[in-house]
Image (spheres, helix red, strand yellow):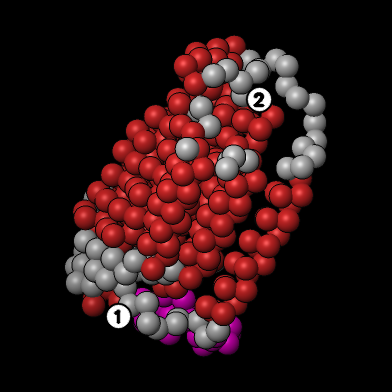
């Protein structure tokens, strides 16, 4: 029974992850991400981590992916990406090599260490059964780890303020991103060229009316 | 068949590697972000599995904080992407080399 549930959710997780990797449209990638997150939530339930499974669905599949979809749709960046071109020559084979070696390394570390986990078994925070999980987690969070909880509250406040500041629409025309002259010799004569390029971009974007 | 901890750890390792490969190959910043989420989920799965294996609640506590930090990270990261895309339409990660200074 457990093995069946595990194998089905593992299939769901891995196909979802593969979908994120190869989806050409960002909206499809976000939906594949939801699939993976649900699969992980099922595995949490299978391991009696019921509270985390609920949080996984609510926070990840609910809030985070919806935020992704909002940004995709608001910005209108949901055009398909051409995966046929390889922007950096030899990037894909190198990445495949890196991925394979990373997988080998992780499997070695995890599977060797699982036979002899280091450290003593915890006696202060024992794992309850599934029905007890939320209560135990809450007790541990608000007694032993209450300082960390306060810090995460502060972190969330900072993140909200930062997001508002970053996404705020500035008054006046926007400055375009500076154009960096790649592979240019750094000397005095290259400086006016860079300024000229920047002005050209300015006019092309048709928002340089108020700027000099 | 009994599901042992190694099954979960193997799955998490595969998921983490897929996320890393996606992060290195995709050019759309939003999809790169999603690949980071995949990697975070793989780590969360590892935490929960080892916590269950050791009979310790600390693994689940760590996952809780990872979730909060991931949410904050997504908020700030998406705000940066919004700010960049407003100035330059259709920017891919390759076009943003100016961030390197």
Q: In this view, does A98 lie above or below B56?
A: below
Tags 1 and 2 on a common chain: no
The residue shown at (58%, 83%) is A186
**Residue placed most toward the observer, A3 or A36:** A3
Magenta segment = A178-200
| Chain of the residue on which disc 1 is drawn | A
Dot 2 crowding, Cα within 10 Å, few <14, some 14–19, many 20+: many
Secondary structure at badge 2 equals: loop
* Residue A33: assigned label: none
Judge left or right: residue A29 versus residue A9.
left
Q: Does the magenta stretch include residue A189?
A: yes
Question: How many badges with numbers are in the image?
Answer: 2
**Residue placed most toward the observer, B90 or A141:** A141
**Would you identify the image quadrant in which residue A208 lies?**
bottom left
**Residue placed most toward the observer, B29 or A58:** A58
The residue shown at (61%, 52%) is B10
Judge left or right: residue A177 versus residue A155.
left
Q: Are marks 1 and 2 in contact (CB under 8 Å)?
A: no
Secondary structure at badge 1 equals: helix
Q: Is residue A78 above or below residue A171?
A: below
The residue shown at (37%, 62%) is A19
The residue shown at (34%, 41%) is A61
- Residue A87 screen position, x and y as percent: 45, 81
* Residue A200: assigned label: 1
Q: Does the magenta stretch include residue A204?
A: no
* Residue B56: assigned label: 2
- Residue B57 screen position, x and y as percent: 61, 24
């Amino acid at each position: 029974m457990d093995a069946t549930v595990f194998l089905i959710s593992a299939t769901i997780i891995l196909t979802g992850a593969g979908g994120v990797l190869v989806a050409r449209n960002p909206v499809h990638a976000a939906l594949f991400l939801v699939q993976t997150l649900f699969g992980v939530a099922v595995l949490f339930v299978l391991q009696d981590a019921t509270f985390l499974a609920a949080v996984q669905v609510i926070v990840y599949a609910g809030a985070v992916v919806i935020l992704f979809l909002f940004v995709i749709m608001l910005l209108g960046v949901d055009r398909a990406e051409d995966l046929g071109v390889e922007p950096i020559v030899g990037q894909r084979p190198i990445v495949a090599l890196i991925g394979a070696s990373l997988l080998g390394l992780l499997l070695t570390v995890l599977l060797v260490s699982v036979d002899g986990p280091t450290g003593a078994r915890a006696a202060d925070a024992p794992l309850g059964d599934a029905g007890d999980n939320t209560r135990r987690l809450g007790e541990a969070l608000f007694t032993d780890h209450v300082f960390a909880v306060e810090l995460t509250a502060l972190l969330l406040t900072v993140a909200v303020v930062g997001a508002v500041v970053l996404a705020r629409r500035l008054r006046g025309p926007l400055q375009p991103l500076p154009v960096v002259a790649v592979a240019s010799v750094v000397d005095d004569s290259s400086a006016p060229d860079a300024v000229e390029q920047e002005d050209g971009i300015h006019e092309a974007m048709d928002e340089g009316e108020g700027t000099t | 068949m009994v599901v042992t901890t190694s099954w979960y750890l193997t799955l998490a390792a595969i998921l983490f590697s897929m996320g890393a490969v996606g992060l290195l190959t995709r050019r759309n910043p939003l999809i790169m972000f999603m690949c980071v989420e995949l990697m975070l989920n793989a780590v969360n799965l590892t935490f929960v599995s080892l916590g269950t294996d050791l009979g310790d609640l600390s693994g689940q506590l760590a996952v809780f904080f990872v979730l909060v930090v991931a949410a904050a990270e997504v908020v700030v990261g998406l705000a940066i992407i919004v700010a960049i895309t407003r100035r330059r339409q259709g920017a891919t990660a390759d076009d943003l080399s100016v961030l390197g200074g």
